[in-house]
Image (cartoon, rainbow, N blue to C red):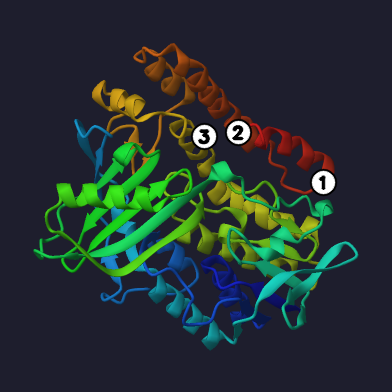
Amino acid sequence: MKKIICAGAGHGGLAAALLLAREGYDVTVLETKSRKELGYDWHDCAWLPAFERIGIKPDNPEFVYPFFQYTYHNPAETVAFTVKNKSIENLRMFDRRYLLDLLIDECKKAGVKFEFGKNITGAIVEGHKVAGVHTARKEYKADLVIDAAGMDSPVRKSLPPATGVQKEIDSDKIIWTYRAYYENRLNKPAPEYQNIYFFHCGKPGMDWLITEKDFIDVLVGSFSPLTKEDIDRAVADFQRIYSHMSDKILRGGTVQKIPIGKAIPKFVWNGYAAVGDSASMTEPMSGSGISRSISAGAILAETVLNIGDGAYNQKNLWHYEYNYLKKEGESAYSDSILREFLATLTAEDIDYFFEHKIMTEKEIGGGKVKFSSPAEFLQKVTAFVPKAGLLPRMAGAALKLRKAENVKSALPKEFSQNAYSCWLKLYNQL
């Protein structure tokens, strides 16, 4: 049986490792962090069907919480409206460390081997294929390397240019997030609707405050690196608005970088496949990536099983990328375009959109900005915006939305360099 190494203990990599080990594959997970250090100390949302797909059931009520509806606020706090997510029954909030514990335990039961505290430094490249990974003290050879080492993966960054795999995540496709859980000093019960603020305190980005009985979940998200002053200003403003929020931090309090663009254009090569944050598989509007990563891990495992005793070459592994982009990634195209457009706006622009009902419950549906068509987006916005300087950017966003349809149809089902190059030109225009 061929040997598979998963570089990093990300959710998508663990999902693939679990499914492959259940089928008897020799799978080893190498993780730079110690077991105790692994995972963000915060909660995140995910789709229950993603876990059903890999045959696990995260249902411990101590670590799994009901999802909630949101109230959205403009920067001036003059308009607020609520959005009812019709798919909320399939969403839950999960303690991320609980999820990792569950995935790791299930992987071990299936026979996956784990080595923590291994400082992964890059890929072993022999000829025209990845043949394993380097760590600070040892080489690990493998027939296939699954890259689940995150946005700054040393494996992806070390690949030679001939792979065509993008080494760096573009700086404008990153959100910096501060996340902390503060004491709910009045034990105020959770409201029916939680709160999201666009351009909170004038900072380009999106913040939230979620009240739970035992804590207050605060997220400060920025399209540029966060400073201590940014964080302090946002926290102080939340304490002004919500008197039940104390100064005491119960957990968290760190800043993380999260990719929020569409997936990198190529995440497979000979002996190599990236998954999760390593391939920028997140929701462009929120940065949440657990569901997509786990789904991608399942698709990757299915691809490997279909290859069987064949070669883990670029042509065979392309079926993983094709199926991921068709089933999961295409929905990120329009979200990514609209997020990038929002990042060009000022707080005053957002206020105008809210106050003149250009952005309403209809456009922010299911927790993300959407329009029924590019034409609707362009027509609605240009009909109301008095600032001529915004029109070229709006027109550009609308044009990209139209091009997204061409990108979807041009994605080659079978890999060839010519077909891929033609599709890549379209993909890079989004």
Question: Which kind of residue does numbered mark 3 sit on?
Answer: Ile
The first of marks 3 and 1 along the sequence is 3
Question: Which kind of residue does numbered mark 1 sit on?
Answer: Ser
- Left or right of 368? Residue 248 is left
Q: Secondary structure at mark 3?
A: helix
**Dot 2 surroundings within 10 Å: few (below 14), some, or many (20 or more)?**
some
Q: Find out whether the residues at labels 2 and 1 contact each other: C-beta distance under 8 Å.
A: no
Q: Find out whether the residues at labels 3 and 1 contact each other: C-beta distance under 8 Å.
A: no
Q: Secondary structure at mark 1?
A: loop
Numbered badge on residue 337: 3
Residue at the spot x=80%, y=54% of the render?
163
Near-viewer residue (182 or 213) = 182
Pair 3/1: label in front? 3
**Rendering quarter of residue 407:** top right
Numbered badge on residue 416: 1
> Height in image: 323 above or below 340?
below
Numbered badge on residue 430: 2
The extreme front residue here reads 229
